[in-house]
Image (cartoon, rainbow, N blue to C red):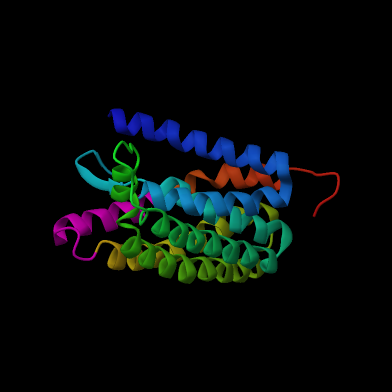
Amino acid sequence: MVNFLWGALFVLVNFSLFLICYRAFGKTGLYAWVGVATVLANVQVVKTIDMFGFVMTLGNTMYGTIYLASDLLNEKYGEKAAKKAVWFGFFTLTMMIIVMQMAVMFEPQPHDLGHSSLQTIFGLVPQIALGSLTAYFVSQFLDVRIYTILKRLFPERNQLWIRNNGSTAISQLVDSLIFCGIAFAGQYTFDVWLEIFITTYIIKFIISAASTPVIYAARNFKFKAEE
């Protein structure tokens, strides 16, 4: 119950910070959010928690906001802007992997306090990174494409929830399958792996549905000069 209540607050804080970032920095803020969220989600995913008897990883909330950002960019600025955000997130994730893998290779001095922790977190990065990069690349571009199609099929302003949830429901299923299939292969027994896969997708879907009011609110933000 503690994890559930803390998780609800965690989601609220993530969405609030997302809205603040967009309100304060506009379109540029969305690109910045994608970059930061991509890195943070891949750090958080190392941690597993128990909620209602199921094993799940952290990072799903933060990762879900990446879809929120790309869908908002597609909604207000077009498919080209959304694709640019996807490439930006891909670059920041690749940069994090390269830089941190080099960082942990430095020989620590005898009284170092941080090396073992960094080694624990980023030592798992290569396999997680391969899964994350592959899943991110496929699912994000799939999300952008599906959103564009749904935007043509359901163009009304009040049909935004269909575009948002329809695109993410499909793309996040693909994302979860690719990521869990690569990142956690050989790390857990099959039953634990299956729990992580199922809960990962369910949490992502819940986050997507919960983000609907957020994208409606963000769409109505007005800026003096749109980028």
Magenta stretch mostly in which secondary structure?
helix
Q: Position of residue 76 (x, y in %)?
A: 72, 56
- Residue at x 29%, y 28% (from the top left corner): 2
**Can residue 206 be seen from the camera position used here?**
no
Q: Choose between 152 and 71: the one closer to the eye.
A: 71
Rendered position, 78 above or below 55: below
**Can residue 14 be seen from the camera position used here?**
yes
Left or right: where 217 falls relative to 121: right
- Residue at x 30%, y 55% (from the top left corner): 123
Q: Position of residue 25 (x, y in %)?
A: 72, 44
- Residue at x 47%, y 57% (from the top left corner): 96
Q: Position of residue 209 (x, y in %)?
A: 48, 48
Left or right: where 224 falls relative to 154: right
Which residues are drawn in magenta?
185-205
Indicate the quadrant where residue 124 lies: bottom left
The answer to if 197 sits in the magenta stretch is: yes
